[in-house]
Image (cartoon, helix red, strand yellow):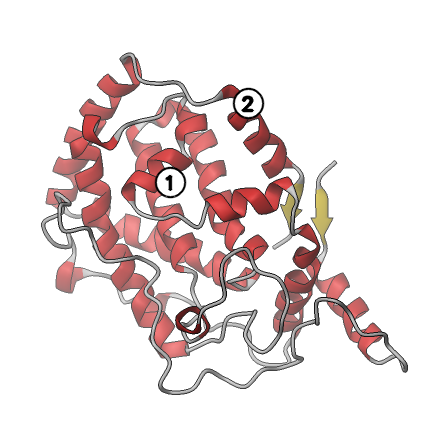
Amino acid sequence: MPRFLPARLLALLILGLLALPGRPASADPAPAPFPDPAPETSAPSVGADPVRPDSPARGSYLGAAAPDTTQILPPPPAPRSTLEAADRATFAATRALKGSPRWAIAETDVAEGAAAILDTFACVLGTRLDEARVPAVIGLLERARLDIAEATRGPKVHYRRPRPFVGNAAPICVQRTQALADSFSYPSGHATQGWAYALIVAALVPSKATAILVRGRAYGESRVICGVHWLSDVTAGRTNGAAVFAALMGDAAFRADMDRARTELGRALAGEGGAPDPALCRREAEGLASVALEF
């Protein structure tokens, strides 16, 4: 049965426990109640690494025509608000997933970029695609990634929200580094990229759109399981990714590249590509079904 995490109920429970006297210490300390904002020297996390030097990407599609996602997204939850309490409760509750199958998926979902996202969708596509076989698809995704990164950078720098693991020793699924601690949390760049890519791939393979979008949603939610983003960062990331995709669909060059990628991907899926490991896909399906986050 899925583990449902009623965030608001958990928030009230945790706040009540904090008020009890003689509360024992925990092996993994709970998050500090309300950490100070990130210092002004913090480096922004744009949510996407620079495009590789050997990438076929030629520069962003949208440029100056990109939507202003800082205006599109709502502000993150205010300090000491009900929504922030829900974020903190979800972070605390999901620390118990360390070592679980869902945690292992979150560790895998740390990888980002065009080639990584094709691996992410391998089970739902039924084919493991070598990037050398689909250069038009890789070029499309890598070029769109520049617009995705730009759409993430603006809100991150504007809101400067600290990540959930800052100020506490709770477990996360990646190595703690100062660069990660000093980067900003809202919105999630992984969730933005994962949802935008899921929308693109679903448009390329509409017969598998449902499964692709389900996996794209889970890719973003892995950031909550991992402990490096708040739940509201991920929901904002999906809105962010959808805004980028909508703008991209209005660009003639993007649509032309979509047409080429659709033809190429159709041939690749119909060919003799390597099938993903059935056992791996079964574990992925079971792991994703084991946890359901409540938004």
Give the residue displayed 84% in from the left and 73% down from the top. Answer: 17
Image-quadrant location for residue 171: bottom right
Q: Is residue 177 above or below residue 203?
A: below
Question: Is 196 positioned to the left or the right of 83 in the image?
Answer: left
Q: Residue 7 in the image: x percent, y percent?
A: 69, 60
Q: Residue 259 in the image: x percent, y percent?
A: 17, 30
Give the residue displayed 35% in from the left and 60% down from the top. Answer: 47
Give the residue displayed 53% in from the left and 42% down from the top. Answer: 105
Quadrant for the N terminus, please. top right
Q: Residue 95 in the image: x percent, y percent?
A: 66, 58
Q: Residue 170 in the image: x percent, y percent?
A: 64, 66
- Say which mark, if any, is on residue 132: none
Of 146 and 235, the residue lying toward us: 146
Task: Name the kind of residue labelled 2 in the image.
Answer: Ala
Q: Is residue 203 above or below residue 23?
A: above
Task: Name the kind of residue labelled 1 in the image.
Answer: Ala
Q: Earlier in the sequence, mark 2 or mark 1?
A: 1
Residue named by callout 1: 198
Quadrant for the C terminus, please. bottom right
Residue named by callout 2: 279
